[in-house]
Amino acid sequence: MNSIQTARLPLHQRLLRKAERVLGPAGIFFKGFVKHPVMVGAIVPSSRRTIERVLSKVDWEACDLFVEYGPGVGTFCRPVLDKMRRDARLIVIDTNPDFIRYLSRTIGDSRFVAVHGSASEVEAIIRAHGFEHADYVLSGLPFTTLPEGVGPAIMAATHRVLRPGGAFLVYQYTARARELMGRYFARIDKGYEPINVPPCVISWGWKD
């Protein structure tokens, strides 16, 4: 898009484009929040302490496939890739095409696949990439504000796609999503990370 076309955009779109240029990944994350606040759920990415806390229960040697819902600008993607085996795979799924384009352009790792789609379609998505089950699934999706029926559909699909002994790693800003998780996961470990904006409630749902 040239400068004349940009000038013709509405003011809010011009401001979003400027934020993306000036702030880099943070600007793209902010743009995604403004366009899809119900799906993004936060205005800033998670803190490093939150990332380490959420990933602390993963057995990386036993992980062939790690899936993430709502990767945003890759806040978790790079730490996950740093910890994964060289023959493992990370598949991320997002409904926001801006995030998918950004991740595909900036993460040049052969183990990484970014898919534009819904988390409720996770089973078909991983099968399309040669997998029957995932070892771990990570989500920062705001389950309490998703459209009616979407949260339960994602939870059910996640439980089905996980191997026995696998886990659903969920970070939220309230504990209300645990009630929904409890319908599908009999064992839920609980955690909390105060050094985050806002403070983060963490749940690890294990598949028996």
Image: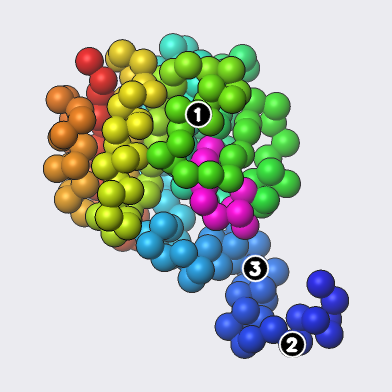
Secondary structure under badge 2?
A: loop
Classify mark 3: helix, strand or loop.
helix
> Where does the image place residue 27, in percent across and percent down from the top left?
59, 66
- Sort mark 3 into few (<14), some (14-19) or many (20+) by Cα contacts within 10 Å: some
- Side of 29 relative to 184 (left or right): right
Q: Which residue is mark 2?
A: 8
Residue 44 located left or right of residue 155 = right
Asked whether residue 160 is drawn in magenta, I would say no
Residue 52: image quadrant is top left
Q: Nearer the viewer, mark 1 or mark 3?
A: 1
**Mark 1 or mark 3, which has the lower sequence index?**
3
Labels 1 and 2: the sequence-earlier one: 2
Q: Looking at the image, is 204 positioned above or below residue 175?
A: above
How far from the left and from the top, in percent, is residue 29? 54, 61
The residue beneath circle 1 is 124
**Which residue is at a point 61% across and 54% down the rendered structure image?**
97
Q: Nearer the viewer, residue 104 or 106?
A: 104
| Number of numbered discs on residues | 3
**Amino acid, disc 3:** Glu
The residue type indicated by label 2 comes to: Arg
Determine crowd level at label 1: few under 14, some 14-19, many 20+ residues with C-alpha closer than 10 A: few
- For disc 2, the neighbor class at 10 Å (few under 14, some 14 to 19, many from 20) is few
The one nearer the camera, 35 or 174, is: 35
